[in-house]
Amino acid sequence: MARIVVEVMPKPEILDPQGKAVAGALPRLGFTEFAAVRQGKRFELDVEGEPNEEVLEQARKAASEVLSNPVIEDVVSVHWARES
Amino acid sequence: MARIGVVTFPGSLDDRDAARAVRLAGAEPVRLWHAEDSLAGVDAVVLPGGFSYGDYLRAGAISRFAPIMGSVVDAANAGVPVLGICNGFQILCESHLLAGAMVKNTQLTFLCTDQVLRVENAQTAWSNQFAQGQEILIPLKNQDGQFIADEPTLDELEGEGRVVFRYVGNPNGSRRDIAGITNARGNVVGLMPHPEHAVEDGFGPGTDGLGFFRSALTALLASA
């Protein structure tokens, strides 16, 4: 079965309080090399049948209309998952 | 008697309290169900607080696609008064009836407090019983309550007088202390704090919440 991956991130200009909290916790656990953290979402959409451009276009549409809110988020990637 | 609908979604919490507030304000509450597409001929609609669909995806994001929301959007566009409280506000933003969006409170915690608001627009269908600049006290309780919009949108809201309520003492990082806004027509209002929990002496911080529902009754009489 083919799989499409959609990645959504909070807009750069919007403060990401979750990412900030994670960034604050890392040094306390000894991870001192990371200057900032932003936290986003990854969706995996499984496709019945043959993967084709039409299905990918549907996924792009779903990503922009449902999976993300353009006021606060950007769709950063819609792509086929690599064969595992 | 005016009939005001209160929509119940899976995960709504404050639908009963909203219906009670409607009754105490002198209207007949009508319970509406998310899976129906009928508004049962109500004169106004309240989208209550809660965590509809568990806030999965984003708060309000999945409720927007509930069958009843198509009818709510049509009614709102036809001028029917619609009030979104807390999760209801988030649903109105996701439905594009109101501008902006809500993200997590800056302190990342659930907040529960009695909150002072200043009335910035006393002319909407849900705020006309207040005086311009009046300060009111109603409960606030949420996790994703930080109102966000881009600068041009915020400027537009301010410029058109569409900021209806502002926090006195910003509790959650909301842009420009905004607690509630309206649409261009002034019939759709959304806010994060909960007027339905301040409608009866002895239960909650006072009765300032009644003004919201009485405003709708006044707006309905004026348009009749």
Image (cartoon, rainbow, N blue to C red):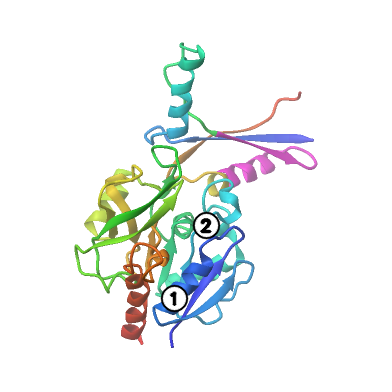
Give the residue at x 29% y 59%. Answer: B165
Of the pair B79 and A23, the residue shown nearer to us: A23
Lower sequence index among marks 1 and 2: 1
Looking at the rendered structure, the secondary structure element under dot 1 is helix
Which residue is disc 2 drawn over?
B50
Looking at the rendered structure, the secondary structure element under dot 2 is loop
Picture disc at residue B22: 1
Q: Tally the numbered discs.
A: 2
Q: Amino acid at mark 2?
A: Gly
Q: Are marks 1 and 2 on the same chain?
A: yes
Left or right relative to B197: residue B70: right
Of the pair A49 and B76, the residue shown nearer to us: B76
Magenta region, residue range: A41-63
Residue A56: name its quadrant: top right
Left or right relative to A5: residue B60: left
Residue B171 percent across, percent down from the top left = 33, 45
Q: Amino acid at mark 1?
A: Val
Residue A61 percent across, percent down from the top left = 58, 46
Give the residue at x 31% y 84%. Answer: B222
Q: Does the magenta run of residues contain B117? A: no
